[in-house]
Image (cartoon, helix red, strand yellow):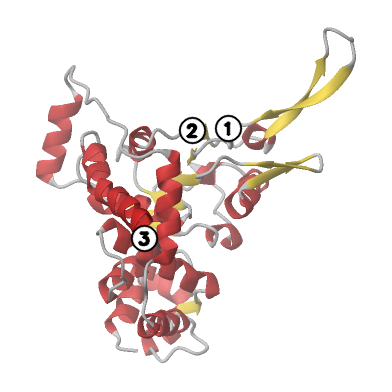
Amino acid sequence: MSNLETQHYKTLVGKLPLLKQEIGKVIIGQEEAVSEVLTALLAGGHCLLEGVPGLAKTLMVRTMADALAMHFKRIQFTPDLMPGDIVGTEVLEEDHQTGKKFFQFNRGPIFANVVLADEINRTPPKTQAALLEAMQEYKVTYGGTDYPLPRPFLLIATQNPIEQAGTYPLPEAQLDRFLLYIKLSYPSEPEELDVLRSTTGTARPDLQTILTDQDVLDLQHLTRQVHISDDLLAYINRLVRASRPQESPVPFVKQWVEWGAGPRAGQALVLCAKARAVLHERFSVIPDDIQTLAYPVLRHRIALNFRAEGEGITTDKVIDELVSKKF
């Protein structure tokens, strides 16, 4: 890496705290969730946000898009939503000069830099599956033609953990496509007081653009260059493999887990650890990066058995046991 490139990357990394500050003008509290969303952005993955209504999930995503000057689209998922409502559809057009008719592909809301799939579990699996190609291949295929998505591309899906009537749980294959599963909690008492104070008046914060699309792409390139030692890579490998009851050395896992995380979990944990290092203005991964991100990386990739569900055991409790062990 040349000195000019090094200086450019240092300048971009130095803007990341400013980006958090800018988002913090609108989103009070939820620092951990904001950091995890930015981690997914730098790692080039997608997020599943879970939280009760009123925790500013939509506002958080829109605010981040505004601070990055990225094209934002929101899709409200409903039981009658069709795949064409997401990816787009062909319409019959007419050339006014020749009178010749032809089919023109009209792009759907998936063609944006940041796409919010709101309440994704309220639509049937057929429509949920319309996102799979976009999430994995960064393109949409329609009528045998590939239409590339704009880059950077970040899909953030939300779901409500309370109301389960009339919902369609995400298939495991699609859950695994999400880099992080982020859970939002209620704000603290002082934070909630600040929310009441700042959102019930006439003042509106003026957001500044901190990074451009190209800056984000450069940071994604930098993220993959962050150093991670062989020892930490081996630790991640052992950690992920220990989540599988068939081969786990942890009795807790054998007792409560039906099946564990696959190889994609290890890839996600490495990339997210690198992205967290960049967010903290470091160019090398440390163990804390791995242990912190093990929760959002693994919680949707571990399936508990019926006994665990009956006893109130959660995947986060399983991850507690895994992280506490010295592999």
Binning the other alpha carbons within 10 Å of mark 2 as few (below 14), some (14 to 19) or many (20 upward) gives some
Closer to the camera, 299 or 208?
A: 208
Q: Residue at x 38, y 88 (%)?
A: 250
- Residue shown at 65% from the left, 37% from the top: 87
Q: Looking at the image, which residue sits at the far top?
A: 97
Measured in 3D between alpha carbons, the distance from the residue under mark 3 to the one under mark 2, in whole angstroms, is 25 Å
Q: Counting residues from the N terminus, which is met first, the one under dot 1 or under dot 2?
A: 2
Location of residue 258 in the rendering, given as x and y in whole percent from the top left corner: 51, 77
Determine whether 201 is above or below 319 in the image: above
Q: What amino acid does circle 2 point to? A: Arg
Q: Nearer the viewer, residue 294 or 96?
A: 96
Residue contact at pointers 1 and 2, CB within 8 angstroms:
yes
Residue 109, labelled with which disc?
Answer: 1
Q: CA distance from mark 3 to mark 1?
A: 27 Å
- Res 294 visible: yes
Q: Amino acid at mark 3?
A: Ala
Q: Secondary structure at mark 3?
A: helix
Where does the image place residue 90, in percent across and percent down from the top left? 76, 28
Mark number, residue 74: 2
Residue labelled with disc 3: 275
Q: Is residue 222 above or below residue 191?
A: below
What residue is at 49 percent from the left and 70 percent from the top?
267
Q: x, y percentage for residue 320?
A: 30, 75
Q: Amino acid at mark 1?
A: Pro
Q: Quadrant of residue 299?
A: bottom left
Q: Secondary structure at mark 1?
A: loop
Quadrant in the picture for the C terminus: bottom left
Whether residue 58 sits left or right of residue 282 in the image: it is right
Left or right: 70 with respect to 56? right
Q: Residue at x 50, y 57 (%)?
A: 178
